[in-house]
Image (tube, grey):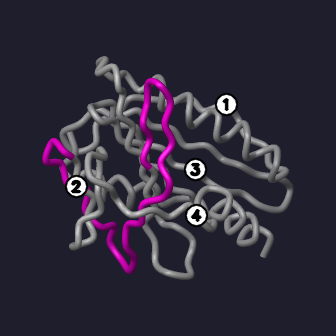
Amino acid sequence: MRACMVFWALCLILAVGPGNVRTATAGTAATVTPAGRIALPDGTVIPQFPGAGAWTELAPKASDRYEIQHFLYGAPGEAPVLELFVTTDKRGESPDGAFEMGLIKGFLSGFAPRAGLRYREPDFDNRVIGAAWVKHTLVKLSDDRVALWVHVYIYPRMPSLTFLAIRVSEGGERRVEEYLAAAGLR
């Protein structure tokens, strides 16, 4: 019961709130197509995740250097299945994933203590998924009664893609990796 409550709270903190949802605007790095996919300007298409649901774009974040678009995949009334952060470096510098790893570390260090959860600092490894090298980590957030598993996959490219999946039970990594491999991302 507490695991479900913490999971829903996490989803609310991450995304759902009045004014957070926005429609795609011309000139942005990524848009949700009428077919429910995410289209990037370089022709890359992020397909729907298997199962019921749709991609929804949330309010973007920006600094002098980066623009970050945030998308959730899920069915209405259910917790998101997958999140995607599309990061554009406005300076056009070659991506290495360092900024995105910092975002994930910042998210964990901010969220976990507020939710009363413990975690270890993420340790990113490099792995091949499909035809692409990605930075990956799996982080367990827990207390004495609940555990959440945070799966992260960073594609350091222009724009960079950071996929995040949060699960209330152990496992799930294989399903996410099969989806990413089938998507053919580079």
Q: Position of residue 27 (x, y in %)?
A: 26, 46
Instruction: Determine the residue positioned at 51% across, 48% down.
Output: 151
Gap in angstroms between the C-alphas marked 4 and 3: 26 Å
Instruction: Check disc 1 and report the residue beneath it.
Output: 121
Q: Which of the marked residues, 2 or 1, is nearer the chain's N terminus?
A: 2
Q: Is residue 72 left or right of residue 131?
A: right
Packing grade of label 2 (10 A; few <14, some 14-19, many >=20) is some
Q: Find out whether the residues at labels 2 and 4 contact each other: C-beta distance under 8 Å.
A: no
Frontmost of labels 4 and 3 is 4
Q: Is residue 165 left or right of residue 46?
A: right
Q: Which of the marked residues, 4 or 3, is nearer the chain's N terminus?
A: 4
Q: How many marks?
A: 4
Local secondary structure at mark 1: loop
Q: Which of the marked residues, 3 or 1, is nearer the chain's N terminus?
A: 1
Gap in angstroms between the C-alphas marked 4 and 1: 32 Å
Task: Indicate which disc residue 19 carries.
Answer: 4
Gap in angstroms between the C-alphas marked 3 and 1: 12 Å
Q: Is residue 98 left or right of residue 106?
A: left
Frontmost of labels 2 and 4 is 4
The residue closer to the viewer here, 89 or 106, is 89
Instruction: Check disc 3 and report the residue beneath it.
Output: 150
Q: Amino acid at mark 4?
A: Gly
Task: Indicate which disc residue 39 carries.
Answer: 2
Gap in angstroms between the C-alphas marked 2 and 1: 33 Å
Local secondary structure at mark 2: strand
Which quadrant is home to the C terminus?
top left
